[in-house]
Amino acid sequence: MLTETLHYTLNHILLLRLMMIFPFEKVKTLHNFLFLAAARSCDCPRPFTFIKLKSGAYSFEIQKVLAEFKRSDYMVDHLKLNDKGREIYYSFAHVLKYHRFPQHCLNMVQEYGENVWRVDHEILFEQKFREKKVGDKIIFQPIF
């Protein structure tokens, strides 16, 4: 019998945490949130590459991780974790405290509170987003 193993990266664990604590209703909002987090972090490594869409940003890397979660049956609903997903998160969550970008994302979650709609609105005013054309890649230079 062949079993599939999923290799967890910091991005996997970060997405698990965000799905646990932030009421994302749309995948688009998750992509936009991580774009804003990357754009607003001045001293953190920024792990994603985005493509500008008409009404937001899209990352193939984020989408790939979400597809892996769905395939591994970690989600009960669109962006809600089931018991298996929460168990995986709790097994690896301690790793996040050693990295600045996940902490930056958590600070942003606190700023937004329950106002998830602001994420999809504010991305339209973000400078890096505005200066690109639809279809352009937006690559944040890694900071070491």
Image (spheres, rainbow, N blue to C red):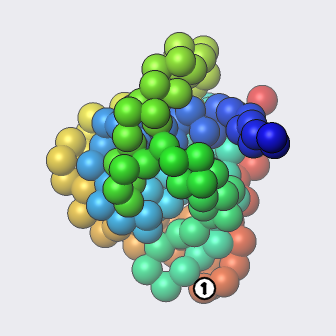
Question: 31 or 15, which lies in front?
Answer: 15
Q: Quadrant of residue 41?
A: top right
Is residue 108 something one can see in this rendering?
Answer: no
**Pointer 1: what residue?**
134
Residue 46 % position (x, y): 66, 43
Q: Residue furthest left?
A: 114
Outermost residue toward the front in this view: 1
Residue at (49%, 85%) from the top-left corner? 54
The residue at the point 46 percent across, 25 percent down is 87
The one nearer the camera, 92 or 18, is 92
Residue 69 is situated, as x and y percent measured from the top left of the image, at 56, 48
For image coordinates 46% across by 36% down, the residue present is 85
When asked about the image quadrant of residue 136, the answer is bottom right
Quadrant of the image occupied by residue 129? bottom right
- Amino acid on which disc 1 is placed: Val
Q: Relative to residue 51, is residue 66 depicted above or below?
A: above
Q: Position of residue 34 (x, y in %)?
A: 50, 51
The x and y percentages for residue 65 are 62, 51
The quarter of the picture where the C terminus appears is: top right
Would residue 43 be found to the left or right of residue 24 on screen?
A: right
Circle 1 Cα neighbour tier, 10 Å, few/some/many (<14 / 14–19 / ≥20): some
